[in-house]
Amino acid sequence: MALHRLTSITMGVPNVAETSAYYGDFGLVPVADGWFTTRTGGRQLRIVAAPTRRLVDLHVGVDDTDDLARATGNLQRLGLNVQHGSGWIRAADRATGTVAYLEIAPRLTEQAVPATQYNGPGRAARTGDRAPGVLRTAPVRPRKLGHAVLGSTDFETTRAFFTEGLGFKISDHIKGAGTFMRCSTDHHNVLVQAAPVSFLHHTSWQVDDVDEIGRGATALLNKDPARHVWGLGRHHVGSNFFWYLKDPAGNFSEYYADMDCIIDDQLWKPEIWADIRALYSWGPPVPGSFLAPDDLAELMAAAHSS
Ligand SMILES: [Fe+2]
């Protein structure tokens, strides 16, 4: 039938204990063997040891063996080696080295969380009580893994791997620099962008609303203000509210809410963005370290020597 969700990712870092503690603070729940769970998505992040920070692999849920067979043929047509197991296949992107698994997995059943009541002009949706966003006290816990963003030294090859090979759909383009792709009804599950070295730029985690983004980021910053990267803002491409924070290995992690949803492929027209909207609609000015992370030279040197 189809790809239906981004199941999980494996992140390699040199400082596993420190980075794991960060994702606990971020609201993911540590379980066994380096795995972390989200509220709805189950096991979605695994942290393992690696010489430098990187995306080790990415898992995508599919419905059935027909999906695996179709992707196998498509990946082989790209000249890639495909390995098989019971209910899964895997292949590696030539440009980034990222290993992608397609695996037969149940579709995610997302219970509808009631819409937060916001008052507006002539519209009192909430009366006689303070806003939920100021009354909530429980730590923020993301609902699910939304997307991963990869820097690639050859983004067109990486895009072909995801689209022509694995079967992701294209949602939007950044002119000459990147492509937003989906394997679910979310606007994007993977973004690949041109970079001088292949690396994991960020992972993004869904929370209930913009208040949860603010509460989650504030809790992380209260522990360590140096974790701040960029936010609060709203992206234009994908429309989501965002706040980016940095883990101790240097990967960015994003809380997001209110992302565009594409149910009917025929009704969505991918566009090519060449101006500031490729980055955001509103928010603080984009910091240089978001575009070129502080450890980029270090990652390039490590890639060169390996
Ligand atoms: Fe993002």
Image: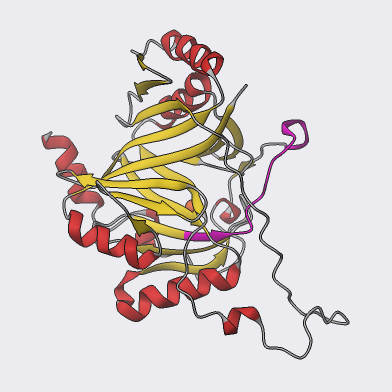
Q: How many numbered badges does the structure rendering display?
A: 0
The one of 24 and 164 positioned closer to us in this rendering:
24
Q: Is residue 23 above or below residue 273?
A: below
Q: Is residue 21 above or below residue 43?
A: below
Q: Quadrant of the C terminus?
A: top left
Residue 70 x %, y %: 53, 13
For this view, does 160 lie left or right of residue 262?
Answer: left
Q: Quadrant of residue 199?
A: top left
For this view, does 234 lie left or right of residue 128?
Answer: left
The one of 45 and 165 positioned closer to us in this rendering:
45
The coloring applied to the image is secondary structure
Residue drawn at 31 percent across, 53 percent down: 31
The one of 234 and 65 positioned closer to us in this rendering:
65
For this view, does 270 lie left or right of residue 246?
Answer: right
Residue 45 x %, y %: 36, 47
For this view, does 267 lie left or right of residue 203?
Answer: right
| Direction left: furthest residue | 305
The one of 145 and 108 positioned closer to us in this rendering:
108
Residue drawn at 44 percent across, 26 percent down: 102
Residue drawn at 58 percent across, 73 percent down: 211
Residue 236 x %, y %: 62, 55
Q: Is residue 7 above or below residue 233?
A: above
Q: Is residue 98 above or below residue 146?
A: above
Q: Quadrant of the N terminus?
A: top right
Residue 160 on the magenta segment: no
Is any part of residue 177 visible from this angle? no
| Direction bottom: furthest residue | 128
Is any part of residue 170 visible from this angle? yes
Residue 264 on the magenta segment: yes
Magenta stretch in the rendered image: 255-268
